[in-house]
Image (cartoon, helix red, strand yellow):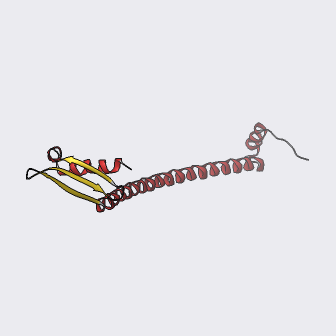
Amino acid sequence: MTNIVSTADLLEMTIKTGEIPSALHSVQNSYQDLLNLRQTQIEGQRSLIKKKGQLEREIEKLNQQSQTLDERYEVINRQEMYTHIGFEAIVEEGTVKKVRVKNSIKNDVFTLKVADLNKLDEFERANYLWSLLSAKS
């Protein structure tokens, strides 16, 4: 048969006998087990937070690599596109007035005024031509 003893009774017995009853030891051990479990949970959470940070850094690295690959892919696409582009000068009165741009893949032809192109720097001209060639997909 199980005797139910209150905490007050346990404390009174401890004071009278000078010894801690085994039931109180059991409570103390259970409490210590709970503290240890809580400490383990805290350490586990810290470990997860640390791993989360590591994963976030890895994801950032992968995103940067992906962006670099996207940029390289775009450059390769442009290079492929340019291998199929032909230029033909249209001469009027001994001066090149227009340039005809042909894309053999898409069978597109553009005629551009040289005066308009001369207003742009080399980079702007390249981007302008690229935008024209890319627009007619």
The answer to whether residue 19 of the structure is visible from this angle is: no
Rendered location of residue 128, percent (x, y) = 25, 47
Q: Residue at x 45, y 54 (%)?
A: 59
Percent of width and height locating residue 133: 31, 51
Residue 102, visible in the rendered structure: yes
Q: How many marks?
A: 0
* Along the viewing direction, whichever of 45 and 77 lies nearer the viewer: 77
Q: From this viewpoint, which residue is outermost toward the right?
A: 1
Q: Residue 104, position in %: x, y?
A: 33, 59
Q: Nearer the viewer, residue 43 or 23?
A: 43
Q: Whole-percent x and y of residue 108?
A: 32, 52
User: Which is more toward the observer, 27 or 53?
Assistant: 53
Residue at left offset 67%, top offset 48%: 34
Q: Residue furthest front?
A: 93
Left or right side of 89 for 14: right
Which residue is the extreme one toward the left?
94
Note whether 6 is above or below 134 in the view shown. Answer: above
Residue at 29 percent of width and 62 percent of height: 83
